[in-house]
Image (cartoon, coloured by chain):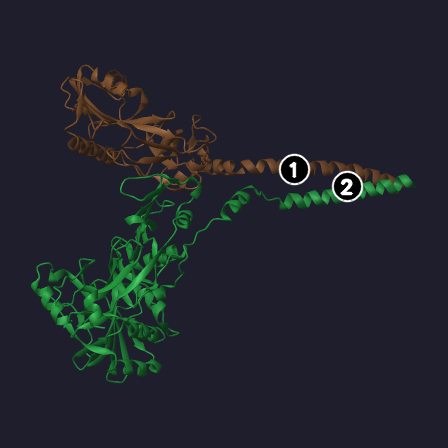
Chain colours: A green, B brown
Amino acid sequence: MKFETLKSIILLILICFSLLLTVGLWNYQPITDEVGEDSENVVEETTIGGKEVKMSSLIAPSQFVFHRNGAHYSFEDGKDRENTYKLMKNWTLFNIHTEENRDVPEAANMMEVIFPTNIPAQAIKNIFTLGEQDFPPSSGEFRRIFFSINDNGGVDVFFKPESEDALAYGASLRSENIYQLEKLIATTEGVSEQVMFTGDGEKRIFLPEGETKVPWHILDTTSIRVAPLKNTLFEDPSIVKDIPAPRVEQRLTDSLSNLEVIEGGKRMVFSGLPREPSPQTAMSSYEVLEKSISFVNAHDGWTDTFRIGDLSTANTSITYYMYLKHLPVLASEGNIHTIKVDYQNGQEKRYARPLVRLEPSINKSGAKYSLSSGDTIIALINESRKYNVKLIEDIEIGYKLVQQSGGYGGYSLIPKWFVLENGSWKEVEESIEGEGGIAGAMGTN
Amino acid sequence: MQWGQIKTLFIFSFLVLDLFLLQQFLDKQTSIQTIGDSQYETSLNNADITISNNVPEEAPTVSLITASADDFSEDQLDVIRELEGQTAKVYNKNLLTSTLDEPVAVTEETIAGVVSKYVPFSSQYSFWNLNEELGRAVFFQKANSRTVYYNSGGVLIVHIESGKMTGYQLVHLKVLNQSGEEKQELINPLEVVERLYTDGVINEGDTVTDMSIGYYSAYSLDPGRKASDQLFAPVWKVTINGNDDAFYSALAAKPIYLQLDENEFIQKTMNGFEEIKSKNSQSVITNKGENTEE
């Protein structure tokens, strides 16, 4: 009897063992690869402490112009421009359609919104709310948006592209938003009259008629560490070597990619071969926009306020400009005011960015610089041989970052007139009349 | 009584079953490591791609190397001063350019022999190609017994006019260190072939005749920029149908197809040499006694 019990137990054990092995065979998964990857990635730092942003916050107009019975008005303070854009982003558009007539609308009362570069029409959905039945356009671009009040009391919206080849779009503004637009066009507070510079006849550049007073600031900088950038930009940071090179502060390379720290440690340029080969596909400007945003987001690279400044489909490169105190920074010593991403075959080929971030203003005095009137600037440009009126794309007030002497990393933020000629911003050199630098600026306070 | 016999029978049959399952389980565990390769093998077989027996089965372990453009040592300069049958000049202490007194007929087969007769230190270089279009033959320098491909800092360029070697230009790299002892994980030959097939570099019906590891640096500096070092990573050189070469980065972290253009490389290197010559025309060391240095 005892022997029979033992046999039963052995049989039971064998049955259980066979079941276990069967289950084991079915579920067996190799674990070799995953172990290696996990242990490597845990501790590496891949963020440089900036923000992750959405497309809508990177696209912003450079100017709002209100046309009232032949006269043009624009905001004096950049803050009003920003607030108006925030308001505009809540508006709803419907009846989006392609527009054959590409002329500037002739309505007596209208609002013109000017962007710093051509914005892909696909981005309309990122700026406005669209009606339920409306599909966002799949191609085309715009540089200006016109909101004109038509005879029926409705509002026609027209997205005007810069180039002749690009598709133009029209739309209508939801009636609930019309009163806000009417209020804006009629506003007399905080706006100043503008002169229109037509250049060789085709241009629409608006400059304030009178002098403009813009505050200047002193800003401190903190530096951005290279190590997290190395971790995120190189596939395998462990093989990256620090190899010195002439005229470069620091050079990191894995033999196929290269990260160079330049401008006295204030800027870096990463260039690399594409990660994977891909067919020679041309990217649309919207793809460049989308890809560059997620590329910079991946390491929280928006360390200050940056906005789209130049987007070219031709050589597929995109440049974001730093914005400080509601104005774009259009020049800087050490070239710290732009983030630029170049694409090749749909992949990041070159990435240049500042390695410093600017800290809030030190001076609270509210001292202002007085900048020449629009008429003076137009006269200066027409007379000077330095400018080719045909090539001028824009004239704007922006900031220049000038390094403070003493070498503690401080910068003065100085307002200036700038001219966009042939794709690059040039400072307008005015002969200063009784307004010598900071002392003069203090005096105008 | 009968139940007892059935139990014995069951015990035996389960014992056999368990042994079988155990064997299966262990088999699976060992085979999983090689499954990656055999996958490539079957898909390449399907595409009718033949892989020659010369192709190694596994990737060797190779470390990255650092190297820089190097000056000729005094001993080497002495060798250059003794050269005969040619007018040799050394610019910037690192570029040797020479014109033969009598041009020598060469073909693709005989060039290596001719070069070893006229060019000093030619044993450090391995023949790459005779480019008839540009009238240049290219030799790449070797480092750690592997070839450094397409680097303007370590190359021998032979000038050929109507089938005759008229002269040559030579620069060399010095390997500084092995970049630590860490050997890198490289991708296996079969995976490279599979990737090249996906990229459309290798087509159906092709034969992969040879594969070997060399070095490459995408950021090759001008030959004149002596001050800076370069990092070289291992690359696979894949020979297709015996005459076409494709390059593939061998680093497991960044396996990519490298499109390298020979004509562009020769032009760029020649321009670099011209620049060195024009900048250093005041200090030239020659074998003809007219030493203009000092």
Q: Which of B276 and A94 is in front in this view?
A: B276
Q: Which numbered circle lies on residue A14?
A: 2
Quadrant in the picture for the N terminus of chain A: top right
Name the quadrant containing residue A369.
bottom left
Q: Outermost residue, bottom direction?
A: A152
- Residue at label 1? B24
Q: Residue at x 34, y 57 (%)?
A: A221
Subunit bearing disc 1:
B
Q: Residue at x 29, y 55 (%)?
A: A336
Work out whether A156 lies above or below A144.
below
Q: Which of B291 and A171 is in front in this view?
A: B291
Q: Is residue B198 visible?
A: yes
Dot 2: element: helix
Dot 1: element: helix
Where is residue A98 drawn, in percent x and y? 27, 70
What's under tag 2, amino acid-wise?
Answer: Leu
Where is residue A209 drawn, in percent x and y? 15, 74
Q: Which residue is drawn at 32% across and 56% down?
A: A288
Q: Would residue A208 be found to the left or right of residue A169 on screen? A: left
Name the quadrant containing residue B120.
top left
Mark 2 to mark 1 CA distance (whole Å): 17 Å
Subunit bearing disc 2:
A
Q: Nearer the viewer, residue A257 or A247?
A: A247
